[in-house]
């Protein structure tokens, strides 16, 4: 069973799922897989389904919507005008009258708090948008990795089925030669043991393919009990990587999670500026009209300001300063983590790609033709049973290693692209560019 480094956290679960898969001795592994899998699915279709169904993307989109709402609130004037009406009955010793008053006032912020709130909210919106884009890339990478592992598992099923079929034919030939006195009991026992081992490997390969197909269904958002069958060869793109330092430099500008950390820092700094501005008290200005029945009328203006004797916002300022310090530290940690991730992913990819290329060069020729030639050589007596088994094992193991090496290179390249903040061409096609553009211009659509 293939388990790439990127899926190591899932290894215990994958193992449990593998052990729980029912294994039948009837039929080939390929038959058992074909009966359990649903219609075929391409990588592009799998990505489109994952983007449409992903709860993580819906959660990230909800965070964007919430941040957009907070920005709208920040751009709105926080205080409404206040209208006050009063009336009273004035009674004297010999007469009475009615007093009437009307006033209209408006409270204002004098420290530019509204603009500072808007700046903080804008940074928070940009943070949530960057988180959304990073989540999209992570989901795309996870689907591509599991898709590749699932395709490789299907190829290993076909290889194991071929091995089991040839082992069965070899057992039949050896049985006939034994009956004719041309083979020994040891030869027959060895052929029987080889057939049993080949059948076991075929069953294990089938179980592994079912596990990866179910895992693919889960990351797509489909029912793991009825997984689709992935189709499409794993094609390694041409290797034209620029120098490592150039990759790191471009990735530091492209990584959406680093951008999210930077926006968090900007929002924290804007909140600190806002907290300091809030030390200035708000003022209220207004006008009033008063009259006493049958006597004087008074028209005037009013001005009111709070005196900051007790609450000088020291607690809020200290908290905002602490948030800025934490954001600075998180940005530094994120920067180092991204660099380490790029270096590690680059090294793994180069090693995996070199291994895959070497095996592809050395594992040449058609496997079926080579195995058929060996079988005919054994039937005609040109080679013995032990030689046949050795040669066949080497051919099949070489093909199996080539499949695993190509899959490892595929997974390593996806991990490298994720570390670099890039989307594959297939993922970019599957995820509508209009959705990203709409998200990027959401700030401009709000009233100011």
Image (cartoon, rainbow, N blue to C red):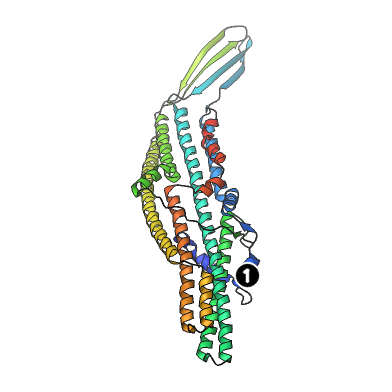
Image location (x, y in percent) of residue 268 = 41, 38
| Residue drawn at x 53%, y 55% as measured from the top left | 143
In this rendering, the answer to whether 197 lies above or below 289 is below
State the residue in front, 300 or 62.
Answer: 62
- Residue with the most extreme top position: 295
Is residue 308 left or right of 18 when viewed as pictured?
Answer: left
The image quarter containing residue 317 is: top left
In this rendering, the answer to whether 398 lies above or below 9 is below
In this rendering, the answer to whether 417 lies above or below 39 is above
Image location (x, y in percent) of residue 288 = 55, 14
Q: Is residue 439 visible?
A: yes
Image location (x, y in percent) of residue 217 = 59, 58
Mark 1 element type: helix
State the residue in front, 54 or 287.
Answer: 54
The image quarter containing residue 344 is: bottom left
| Residue drawn at x 48%, y 83% as measured from the top left | 382
State the residue in front, 353 or 334.
Answer: 353
Image location (x, y in percent) of residue 314 = 38, 35
State the residue in front, 108 or 191.
Answer: 191
Circle 1 residue: 32
| Residue drawn at x 50%, y 72% as measured from the top left | 370
């Amino acid at each position: 069973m293939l388990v790439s480094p990127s899926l190591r956290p899932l290894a215990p679960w994958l193992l449990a799922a593998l052990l729980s898969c029912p294994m039948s001795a009837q039929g080939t592994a390929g038959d058992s897989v074909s009966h359990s899998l649903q219609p075929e699915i391409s990588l592009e279709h799998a990505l489109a389904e994952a983007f449409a169904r992903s709860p993580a993307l819906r959660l990230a989109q909800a965070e964007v919507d919430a941040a957009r709402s907070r920005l709208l609130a920040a751009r709105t004037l926080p205080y409404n005008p206040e209208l006050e009406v009063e009336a009273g009955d004035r009674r004297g010793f010999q007469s009475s009258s009615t007093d009437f008053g009307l006033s209209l006032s408006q409270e204002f912020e004098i420290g530019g708090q509204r603009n500072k709130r808007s700046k903080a909210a804008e940074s928070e919106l940009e943070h949530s948008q960057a988180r959304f884009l990073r989540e999209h890339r992570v989901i795309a990478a996870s689907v591509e990795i599991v898709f590749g592992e699932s395709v490789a598992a299907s190829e290993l099923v076909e290889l194991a089925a071929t091995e089991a079929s040839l082992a069965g034919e070899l057992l039949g030939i050896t049985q006939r030669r034994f009956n004719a006195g041309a083979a020994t009991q040891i030869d027959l026992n060895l052929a029987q043991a080889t057939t049993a081992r080949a059948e076991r490997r075929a069953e294990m390969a089938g179980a592994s393919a079912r596990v990866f197909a179910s895992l693919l269904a889960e990351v797509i958002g489909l029912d793991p009990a009825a997984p689709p069958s992935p189709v499409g060869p794993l094609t390694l793109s041409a290797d034209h990587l620029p120098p490592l330092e150039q990759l790191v430099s471009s990735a530091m500008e492209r990584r959406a999670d680093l951008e999210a950390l930077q926006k968090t820092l900007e929002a924290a700094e804007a909140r600190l500026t806002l907290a300091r501005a809030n030390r200035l008290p708000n003022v209220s200005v207004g006008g009033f009209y008063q009259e006493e029945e049958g006597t004087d009328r008074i028209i005037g203006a009013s001005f009111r300001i709070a005196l900051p004797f007790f609450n000088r916002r020291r607690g809020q300022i200290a908290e905002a300063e602490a948030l800025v310090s934490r954001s600075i530290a998180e940005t530094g940690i994120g920067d180092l983590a991204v660099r380490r991730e790029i270096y590690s992913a680059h090294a793994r990819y180069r090693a995996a790609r070199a291994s895959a290329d070497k095996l592809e060069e050395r594992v040449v020729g058609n496997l079926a033709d080579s195995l058929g030639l060996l079988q005919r050589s054994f039937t005609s007596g040109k080679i013995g049973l032990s030689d046949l088994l050795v040669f066949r094992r080497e051919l099949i193991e070489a093909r199996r290693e080539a499949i695993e090496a190509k899959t490892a290179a595929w997974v390593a390249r996806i991990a490298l692209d994720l570390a670099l903040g890039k989307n594959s061409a297939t993922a970019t096609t599957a995820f509508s560019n209009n959705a990203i553009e709409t998200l990027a211009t959401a700030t401009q659509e709000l009233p100011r």
